[in-house]
Amino acid sequence: MNTIMNWKTDWTTFAVSGGFLFLFVIFSLVDIDMVEGWVTESFNWSVTFFGAYWQLLLLGNFVIGIILAFSRYGNMRLGKMEKPENGYFRWISMILCMLLASGGVFWAASEPIYHFVTTPPLFANNEMTPQEAVIPALSQSFVHWGFLAWACLGTLTTIVLMYAHYHKGYPLKPRAILYPIFGEKIFNKSIIGSTADIVSIIAVAAGTMGPIGFLGLQIGYGLHFLFDIPNTLPTNIIVVGALILIAAISVASGVDKGIQFLSRLNVIFVVLLTAIILIIGPTMFLIDSFISAQAFQLQHFFEMNLYRGNQAWLGYWTVFFWGWFLGYAPMLAVFISKISRGRTIRELIVAVSIIAPLVSNFWFAVVGGTGLSHELTNPGSISTPLDEGGMPATVMAIMDQIPMGLWLAVGFLIVSIVFVSTTVDSISYTVAVTLQGTDYPQKWVRVFWVVLFGILSAVLLTIGEGSIQALQNVIVVTAVPVSILLLPPLWSAPKIVKQMAAEQHTAPSVESKKEVKVKAAK
């Protein structure tokens, strides 16, 4: 059997996935209205026919993962390594920066206000006072960025991937998710395997280029608001260029240097901003709101996650988010597989499915809760800027209400850039891993995808914000085949865990960290 270091570049997957992105941009340049029409129609179809399935899939993934974590198999180590490659803080930092980068600042500020102004339909008939509406608003945000959202990114799927790659020596690719079903055939010029890799790359590429484009627009707004710098296309493209430069340097230096450094730096920034806002902001309101909203979410856990009443609202909110996160799932599971060697099953599942959601929920409570507090005392102070200027205006409006607002707003802009940079470098790394089948892909492949994402995002910015939104919705469309790919781990992951337990009783040894580094250097 070939070792994990000997796999060549999959040029077919490279050409098809990269070609799709180029064609999307070309069609957008020719007729953006036509492209928006195609995407909208496909998006609506996906939400209508797969929304309920996605909700059940995410719930099943979370529940089975928790059962495995606290079963007698929870202490089993993954990746044939006796000790973790990455320290706990560094490991958690890299995990946190994956999903939060997509909504860590702007959604955290805006989504609670959206749900406060318009109460989610599940609770809309309760005739709540403004004070009473705060908790359901925060809770709904917690659901969208909480336990189920995180669990689908790296629990059962990661276990399958790590087993196929580190224990059996097969390439670290999304197609490895199907290894328990098809065996070695899935890696041998398999149409099904190639399709799994291609749709996974396209989905995560769409989900990466979308935030890059939106970041250019959002930072441009912030620079204009704070420093009166013209919010023009050149400004937005310069922002994208700076982001791509940071991500390219990071990904070129590898996971153990650049990517983990940016992740740790960003988490430190977030902790610092959180602490400052807690101290100078409505401290007890934020703490009480977080605890109450978390309890409210747990009390209404199943009805909020499985709500099927208002289809239009679901398509705009819950099902949209579920499709978005599912589109990310295979590639982020590849990334988590790389950084989680030596971790136990319990550590993996608790970190991704419990710790990360609680941290992101607290961040949402602090940022969004500050906005809710000021909206209560001064109606319209946050909701009006949100209505008129969108999500970037919400962040600036919140910062404008508290002491040190200018410096905090600058801090939020820096965090936004670093957040998205960490996503771009992580995703570019995982695309390179998928194309070359090893967790040590060549540097040029990693950097190429960073640059490609940046160039195509800049081109889409020249077309207009509609092209960015259309690309963002593509990830929901591609979530349809990706979600089918993510179904088998619900039963194959528990079987693999039992199989690993049997194998570990007869295995002669596991690799040490030093041996892995020697292998990588060859």
Image (cartoon, helix red, strand yellow):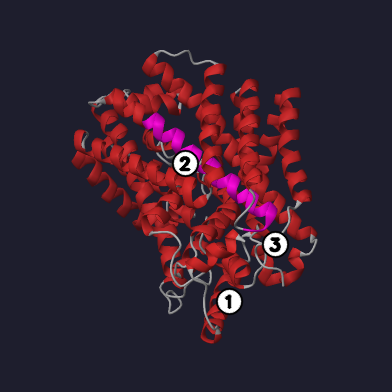
Q: Nearer the viewer, mark 1 or mark 3?
A: 3
Q: Secondary structure at mark 1?
A: helix
Using residue 343 as the reference point, say whether residue 28 is left or right of it: right
Q: Main secondary structure of the magenta part?
A: helix
Q: Which residue is mark 3?
A: 6
Note whether 230 is above or below 522 in the view shown. Answer: above
Query: For residue 44: magenta?
Result: no
Where are the magenta residues, as a range? 412-438
- Across and down, in percent, residue 324 comes to 56, 45
Using residue 360 as the reference point, say whether residue 183 is left or right of it: right
- Across and down, in percent, residue 373 comes to 26, 33
Q: Which residue is mark 1?
A: 495
Q: Which mark is residue 285?
A: none
**Quarter placement of the N terminus:** bottom right
Q: CA distance from mark 2 to mark 1?
A: 33 Å
- Across and down, in percent, residue 23 comes to 76, 34
Using residue 350 as the reference point, say whether residue 291 is left or right of it: left
Q: Secondary structure at mark 2?
A: helix
Q: Nearer the viewer, residue 117 or 169?
A: 169
- Give the mark nearer the N terminus: 2 vs 1: 2
Residue type highlighted by circle 1: Lys
